[in-house]
Image (spheres, rainbow, N blue to C red):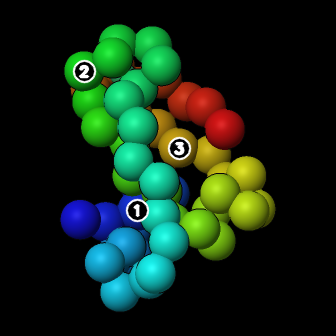
Amino acid sequence: MNCVSCNRNVLEKELFVKFKCPNCGDFEIIRCKTCRALSNAYVCQKCNFVGP
Ligand SMILES: [Zn+2]
Ligand SMILES: [Zn+2]
């Protein structure tokens, strides 16, 4: 599993979040703690929704 923002392997980190895309509800967004703290943008690979 990789963070959708920085593409790093989240399993190497102790904290990450996993949630469904708020737009299509079909794609699982995975973000590491770092990207969440920095509010890095993420892109849904299914519907191209961009969100913080
Ligand atoms: Zn990240
Ligand atoms: Zn989506």
Is residue 31 in view?
yes
- How far apart marks 2 and 1 lie (CA) works out to 17 Å
Question: Residue 6: x percent and y percent?
Answer: 49, 67
In the image, the residue with mark 2 has its CB under 8 Å from the nearest atom of ligand 2 = yes
Where residue 14 appears, as percent x and y from the top left, is: 46, 81
Q: Do tag 2 and tag 1 residues touch (Cβ < 8 Å)?
A: no
The residue at 23%/65% (across/down) is 1
Label 1 lies in ligand 1 vicinity (Cβ under 8 Å): yes
Q: Position of residue 42 (x, y in %)?
A: 53, 44
Name the residue beneath numbered marker 1.
3
22 over 11 or under it: above or below:
above
Between label 3 and label 2, give the one nearer the viewer. 2
Q: Which mark is residue 13?
A: none
- 29 lies left or right of 46: right
Residue occupying the far bottom of the picture: 12
**Disc 3 to disc 1, how far (Cα)?**
9 Å
